[in-house]
Amino acid sequence: MFVRKFFIQKIRNVNGARLFFSSDVKEKKVKIGKHDINYIKVGHGPHACILTPGGLGTIWTSYKEQIEGFDRNKFTLVVFDPPGFGKSYPPAREFTMDSYGNDADTGYQLMKILDIPKFSVLGWSAGGSASLVLAAKYPDAVRKLVVWGANSYILDSEIAAYRSIKDVNTWAKHLRDPMIEVYGKERFAEYWAKWVDTMSAALEQSMMDICMQYLKDIQCPTLVLHGEKDPLVNAVHAPFIVKNVKNSILHLYPEGKHDIHIRYAEEFNRRVQDFLLEPAEK
């Protein structure tokens, strides 16, 4: 088991009160399938949640604001690097259209290993798509579901958007540098190119369905959030998910882009925590 410590400074919660968290957040690894899955478990609250990062995302690049901002007296957060991403490497990531299901299975298995039988599922972007699959495949384990920047199928325009930024040298420095820090320049460029190629191949083979077939099987209360100016995920996706997932609600950020949980972190964290703590209708 591998451990790394991170210093977390005291921060303000959404009500302005100072929270003093433990100075140590420990990264650990556990064997799941072919990978040693890197994860953290923080908080000691009764409501457990698992958070799945987006494409090429990691614990800290995807969810730093939630790790630091959620109330640890009410929530226990489990966040992991998906197989082949971040420190869940080697072996390298296998980029296929089954990756969403594999990430969902990995998250479920991680919670079983941690002896957490009932939990809520949160996911951003590709991690949101994987979270939809997890909630559908393991309904008895999932209390509630929250997804944002997620899609259940692919549009031609979205593939075009990915292709336009396939060359990572064209990325803005503040977006490119954190990925290079995690993966190194060569592996980051290789991974991103494989991601885009996988999506492009799906389009060419008319395999536009990421997880549409799973939506009807989701039984838990679901919150879908979306930034209306998201340049990567078309605005049609969030209403489509809500239309096809029973007991779901939608919240839009009119000026939001793909990273609403970062740009609007305090409001986002408050809204999501309130939803998770709200008693479910029977």
Image (cartoon, rainbow, N blue to C red):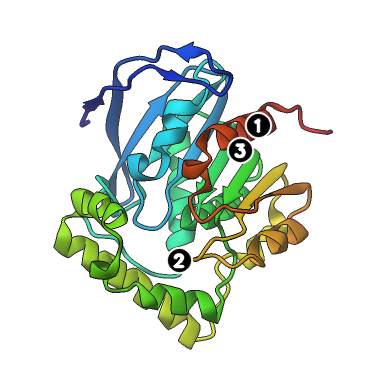
Check residue 276 in the rendering and tell me which mark sits there, or answer none: 1
Q: Amino acid at mark 1?
A: Leu
User: What residue sits 82% from the left and 33% below the top?
Assistant: 281
Q: Is residue 176 above or below residue 51?
A: below
Residue 254 image offset from top left, x and y in percent? 64, 53
Q: Is residue 237 above or below residue 267?
A: below
Q: Secondary structure at mark 2?
A: loop
Out of 255 and 207, give the one closest to the viewer: 255
Pointer 3 or 1: first along the chain: 3
Q: Amino acid at mark 3?
A: Ala
Determine the image quadrant of residue 37: top left
Name the residue tied to disc 3: 141
Check residue 258 in the rendering and tell me which mark sits there, or answer none: none
Residue 197 image offset from top left, x and y in percent? 35, 77
Q: Secondary structure at mark 1?
A: helix
Q: Are marks 3 and 2 in contact (CB under 8 Å)?
A: no
Pointer 2 or 1: first along the chain: 2
User: What residue sits 27% from the left and 47% below the top?
Assistant: 88
